[in-house]
Amino acid sequence: MSKKTAHVSATPATDWLRERSVPFTEHPYDYVEHGGTAESAKQLGVAEHAVVKTLVMQDEDAKPLVVLMHGDRQVSLKELARQIPCKKVEPCKPEVAQRHSGYQVGGTSPFGFRKAVPVYVQQSILTLPRICINGGRRGFLVGIDPQVLVGVLGARPVDCASPQ
């Protein structure tokens, strides 16, 4: 998957995975500002659909939540709000997302979050054989079985994907 084979130093995300005995593979790549999942998928030679982005959102009361979405899809905010249920969902401002997660934007992992927040996962992600998801820093993904998201992380499946 990756050209680089060097071990990447620990992050709160990899520590979290190791503490729970979750097997994962490390996939460093050259971070490109605003490159997103298209860039990481290209560099790692994986389908963008299997690269999962971690999106920090908030509800109408400014309570944080996380949405895990395919790299080649976007979140329908209205559909997500209807399913979780709440009145409104919107993305957090970068500085607010960083405060909630403890991660720099572009390096946000759903594992090892600073605070416990509800996590929602696009249900079709769970049908994939393997996914790549941020490992806790820019330019670093981890490969895991998607069932870890519901079984270990406790993410709740939702259906809120729309084309990019």
Image: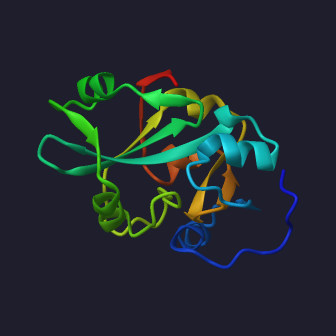
- Seen at 83% across and 56% down, the residue is 2
Question: Where is residue 26 drawn, in percent x and y?
Answer: 74, 63
What is the basis of the colouring in this image?
Answer: rainbow
Spot the residue most to the front.
Answer: 33
Judge from the rendering whether residue 29 lies leftward or rightward of residue 134; answer left or right.
right
Question: Where is residue 135 drawn, in percent x and y?
Answer: 60, 62
Residue 79 showing in the rendered view: yes
- Seen at 66% across and 59% down, the residue is 31
The total number of labels drawn is 0
Judge from the rendering whether residue 130 lies leftward or rightward of residue 75; answer left or right.
right
Compared with 142, 14 (above or below) is below
- Seen at 69% across and 49% down, the residue is 40
Residue 146 showing in the rendered view: no
Question: Where is residue 84 drawn, in percent x and y?
Answer: 27, 32
Q: State which quadrant residue 155 falls in.
A: top left
Compared with 116, 88 (above or below) is above
Question: Where is residue 16 drawn, in percent x and y?
Answer: 53, 69
Judge from the rendering whether residue 104 lies leftward or rightward of residue 129; answer left or right.
left
Which residue occupies the foreground of this view, 60 or 84? 60
Spot the residue most to the left.
Answer: 61
